[in-house]
Image (cartoon, helix red, strand yellow):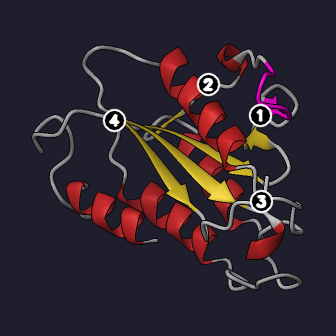
Amino acid sequence: MVVLALATLAWPRPGAAQAPTDGREPADIVLVIDDSGSMGPNYGANDVDGLRYAAARLLIDLATPGDRVSIVRFGNDAVVLGHEDACRQVRPDDVVNVSRCPMHVIGEAGADAALRDITQLPPPEALGRTCMDLGLKLANQVLVANATSERPQAILFLTDGFLDC
C-alpha cells in the first residue's frame, strides 16, 4: 500500500489543472491486485477490509484525463478485469493475446465508470495460491502491447508479499 501512496504523489489532486497544462504526460498504469487466499478471511486475513480495492478506487480518482488504466487481479491465475474471457494467464508459459484487452482511457465515455464498477465490487473469494509471477507477467504484457514512446508506464502492485506459487 505504501507504493501506491508514494506513486499517487505524482498525480494532481481533483480540481487541479489537467493535462497537458499540469506538466505531466498522460501515463499508462496497470494496477495489479493480489486476491490470493492470504488476502481473505480464511487464511492470513491480510486484507479482509478490501483496502486494496479502496486503493484502486483512489488511483482512478487521482488519474487525469488521457491516463490509460488496466487492473489485473491474481491468485492461482491472473486476469485483466473487465476482459476476463479474453485476457487470462493460467500458466507462466501461456501466451495471452493482450490486444483483446485494451486499457481504459480516463476521461473517455464509459471508461471511468467501468473502472469504478470493477473496483466497487467486493473482493472475490480467496483465489488460492499467490502466483505473483502471473500477475506481473500479464501486467507487463498489457504495457508492452500499449507502449508508445511518449507515455510513461507504471505497474502498481498491491500484495501482502506472501509467495506460495
Q: Which residue bears the numbered disc 1? A: 83
Q: Give the range drawn in magenta.
A: 88-94
Q: How far apart are marks 2 and 1 (CA)?
A: 9 Å
Residue 102 located within the stretch drawn in magenta: no
| Residue drawn at x 89%, y 68% as measured from the top left | 125
| Residue drawn at x 77%, y 34% as measured from the top left | 83
Left/right placement of residue 155 relative to residue 88 reads left
Q: Distance between the residues labelled 4 and 1?
A: 21 Å
Q: Which of marks 3 and 1 is nearer the N terminus?
A: 1
- The mark lying in front, picked from 3 and 4, is 3
Q: Earlier in the sequence, mark 3 or mark 4?
A: 4
Residue type at mark 3?
A: Asp
In contact (CB < 8 Å): disc 2 and disc 1 = yes
| Residue drawn at x 17%, y 39% as measured from the top left | 24
Question: Which element type, helix, strand or loop, lies under badge 1?
Answer: loop
In contact (CB < 8 Å): disc 3 and disc 4 = no
Question: Which element type, helix, strand or loop, lies under badge 2?
Answer: loop
Residue 14 visible, this orientation: no
Q: Which of marks 2 and 1 is nearer the N terminus?
A: 1
Residue 117: x percent and y percent?
69, 57
Q: How far apart are marks 4 and 2 (CA)?
A: 14 Å
Q: Residue 27 carries which label?
A: 4
- The mark lying in front, picked from 3 and 2, is 3
Q: Which residue bears the numbered disc 2? A: 102
Q: Which residue bears the numbered disc 3? A: 164
Please say if 44 is above or below 140. Answer: below
